[in-house]
Amino acid sequence: MITIKSHGEIARMIDAGKVLQEVFSVLSEKIIAGISTKDIDKIARECIIKNGALPSFLGVPNYFGGIDFPGAVCASVNEELIHGIPGDRILKNGDIVSVDVGAVLKGLQADACRTYRVGDVSPEADRLVRVTEECFFKGLEQCVAGNRIIDISGAVQDYAESNGYSVVRDYTGHGIGREMHEDPEVPNFRTARRGPRLMPGMAIAIEPMINQGTYDVEVAPNKWTVYTKDRKLCSHYENTVIITAGEPIVTTL
């Protein structure tokens, strides 16, 4: 069921988004060669808690028999698409790392992801990260009351594929509010269904997940981390968006 947020709930979602804005601002200065993904998690966790919020991802159950998620962030490096578990891996010059993070403040959620370039990355990696970000903004242009979810999905897919990339099919964006994942699904590709019509007060997380090679992915033995099947690079970019009668509100940007 899609929930329409009240003015008060939207205000609290905006406040939660500001927490993630600060997280990303701090990480943009800290993510350099030599940092571990565990260090990234520690920085983000401390920033969230300092702002009176709670990390949304910490302790999320694994319904496929793995451990509950142990981090405040998902830190996914190079060919890792999503759900990378923070640990002792040291980032090196030329890596790209996607940091997906959620925060809940006064009962309302924010969810966002950035893919960071570590030092001097290859032109191919740099272009992939840039185009993935641009895919989000192509989708954002369709966040107009009266449009449908498929308008967002199609805009993301068309832009990614026109640049020679593939769009992951196994994972999608989602509604968001009191829960991290709510209705509706927000695919980054066209489906047979047009999806619901966008209405003021709807809140969604738009998150292009874009691969250099095939869109096929596979899950690691830890039952969390998702890799590109061909082990080529991938990138992930996400923001929380609230539909209004006018311009959409991006709470995490």
Image (cartoon, rainbow, N blue to C red):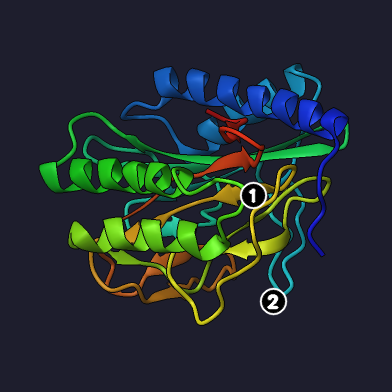
Q: For marks 1 and 2, give the one nearer the viewer.
A: 1
The picture places residue 43, in percent across and down from the top left corner, at 58, 25
The picture places residue 50, in percent across and down from the top left corner, at 74, 17
Q: Compute the Cα span from label 1 to label 2.
A: 25 Å
Q: Is residue 157 visible?
A: yes
**Residue where numbered disc 2 is placed:** 64
Per the image, label 1 sits on a secondary structure element best described as strand
Front-lying residue, 144 or 83: 144
**Residue where numbered disc 1 is placed:** 204
Disc 1 to disc 2: CB gap under 8 Å: no
The picture places residue 76, in percent across and down from the top left corner, at 45, 50
Residue type at mark 2: give it: Phe
Quadrant location of the N terminus in the rendered image: bottom right
Depicted 106 relative to depicted 135: above or below: above
Front-lying residue, 79 or 247: 247
Front-lying residue, 248 or 166: 248
Depicted 173 relative to depicted 36: above or below: below
Residue type at mark 1: give it: Ile
| Residue at the farthest left position | 123
| Residue at the farthest bottom position | 192
* Residue shown at the point (72%, 49%) measured from the top left: 176
- Relative placement, left or right, of 87 versus 52 is left
- Relative placement, left or right, of 49 versus 95 is right
Asked where in the image residue 229 lies, by quadrant, the reply is bottom left
The picture places residue 105, in percent across and down from the top left corner, at 81, 30
Depicted 213 relative to depicted 122: above or below: below
Tag 1: Cα neighbours inside 10 Å, few (<14), some, or many (≥20)?
Answer: many
Per the image, label 2 sits on a secondary structure element best described as loop
